[in-house]
Amino acid sequence: MALTTPSDAGATAREVIAASLHRRDRDVRGIVLATLLLAATAATLVILVTLLTQVIGESAPYLADRGTEFLTTPIGSNPDQIGIWSGLYGSIGIGVIVIIVAIPMGIAAAIYLEEYADQGRRVTQLILVNIRNLAGVPAVIYGVLGFIIFVKWLDPITSGDTVIAAGLTMSVLVLPIVVITSMEAIRAVPQGLRDGGYGVGASRWEVVRDHVLPYAAPGILTGTVLSLARALGEAAPLIIVGAITGFLPETTLTEKFTAVPILIYRWSGQPQPPGSEFSFTAAAAGAGVVLLVLVLFFNASAIYLRNRFEKVRVGQ
Amino acid sequence: MSETTASGNIDVAMGRHIVSPDSETKETIRVSTTEMDTHPVFALEDVSVYYGAFRAVRDVTLPVRPREITAFIGPSGCGKTTVLRCLNRMNDFVTTARVEGTIRYHGVDMYDPAVNSTEVRRRIGMVFQKPNPFPKSIYDNVAYGPRLMGTKKKADLDEIVERSLRGAALWDEVKDRLKETGLGLSGGQQQRLCIARAVAVEPDVILMDEPCSALDPIATARIEDLMREIKDRYTIVIVTHNMQQAARVSDRTAFFTTEINPESDRRTGVLVEFNPTEKMFSNPDDERTEQYVTGRFG
């Protein structure tokens, strides 16, 4: 198409230009692509909404009937009377152990690798590659690892298949994720900020403490909360570590344990006992809602804290 | 404070820090340190800097004299910034960087393993190419260094902040908004804030790495005025791409250029000439200097 001004000047030329400027049929492929992208977004939303309606729909009558009792009673054999207290206790215990063990350790390792280690060295490169690979190892494998190390070898400390062993296993599982996301957050800190600190005579640690960590805090926080959500949601490693699915008389740190995802897994497959008003499936859906609320709560607090920390970046 | 006393000169230099709360005292002390003024602050001897196996700049020998502005000029890649960053051991953070030859600071070998590099950077402040205030308030930006050095009392900090901001010709513009973020200032104001931050720890030397390259001509002129104002108190070394700037502000100029290594086809920086600025721009010793300053290459 010639874009030169038509030689037969005057009104015709203006019409031709006006007509070409109003054409809409040029970018057909672009329109198709945009439609596909929109369709993909819509499909994602539909899946999410279906999931939520399904879980909430199935559990609503059950949760309405049980109320808070569902949260405070231990597990049992009658779906009309069972609760998820045992699972909640285990999950919260696991979460606390992850917060105490994996998060500080992961952030510390990230600070070391980004700010202190010589990234050009072979050893450092090897460590980095390994951490990246560890983040991709399937959760079940961590279950086996946790069973061997924390349940068997470290039995004197963990008392075998307990919340402590499960929490430590989950800590190992999320550690690479914490390290990687924290490293990325630290790497995003502008070099000028470090130079400014060094330029007035701050030591390496003072620069990390006063400039690098405050700037990287929102990113580190997002990563750690996502890893916490992962630790709360995983079931596979817990099964191998020895989570109980049946009767659990007591909830203590040094005896057998269970967790919310384990209860969901167990209850979903259990047939409805004769004479009971509700099915185990409804109880599983109820436990699913509790888990979702728990994870949403963590994510929401992460967003809130991130927004607060982000003010640090503009010096307010 | 005077722990690394390798020569009498350093004692004098440190004494200046201790007993100089205001400019009057500084003046009297300065008169008594004429002996020190004749000794170079930095003495570079056959300095080469490597990044891994690559030699970025070779065989630099020059003195930097006290209470003078020394300018490093030359085309891109000639190693002037590399040499500047060696003067306060900023290159320590580049793990592949290695310095050969000796750099003496008041007679002390700066790369001696016994030298504390953090202390080096406290005495030798730096202002960077891109203004980089901390994401903190204007007040906290200036007070950061003094706080690290142990100044805790608010009255003392207030005084340091005001003195430093006045010293950087910024006080009148920001005195009513010290609690506001330093990032809200204009580029030129941010750079002056960085200068205030550097002078707040009472350094002996201020290194400036192309401090005006991100600024407009008016802001540049203000920084240049400021440099001339403070040079009776600080030794200044400035790297600049702008030859007119070197001609305007500096007392001595070092001209660097690049040589192509025929084997590796990589460029290594060399020091061509180091002379009083007036001579460099009117009657330089080296032909390459003349070509550069008259705009025929570079």
Image (cartoon, grey):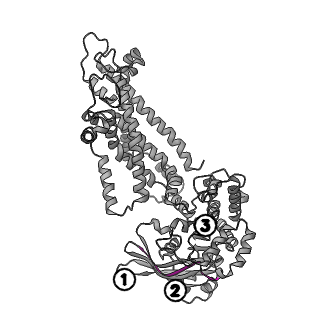
The reply to whether residue A153 is in sight is: yes
What's the CA distance linking mark 3 and mark 2?
45 Å
Identify the residue at image location x=71%, y=74%: B29
Q: Residue furthest right?
A: B24
Q: Which residue is mark 3?
A: B1
Q: Residue furthest front?
A: A156
Identify the residue at image location x=41%, y=55%: A112
Give the numbered dot on residue A27: none
- Give the left or right position of residue B222, taking residue A153 as reference: right
Q: Is residue A14 above or below residue B63?
A: above
Q: Amino acid at mark 3?
A: Met
The boundaries of the magenta stretch are: B38-50
Q: Which residue is mark 2?
A: B288
Name the chief secondary structure element in magenta.
strand
- Give the left or right position of residue B222, taking residue A90 as reference: right
As rendered, which of A90 and B237 lies closer to the eye? A90
Q: Where is residue A219? Give x, y as percent.
A: 46, 47
Q: Which residue is mark 1?
A: B262
Identify the residue at image location x=49%, y=80%: B257
Please tell me how crowded label 2 is: few (under 14), some (14-19), or many (20+) other residues with Cα within 10 Å: some
Q: Where is residue B97? Give x, y as percent.
A: 43, 70
Pointer 3 or 2: first along the chain: 3
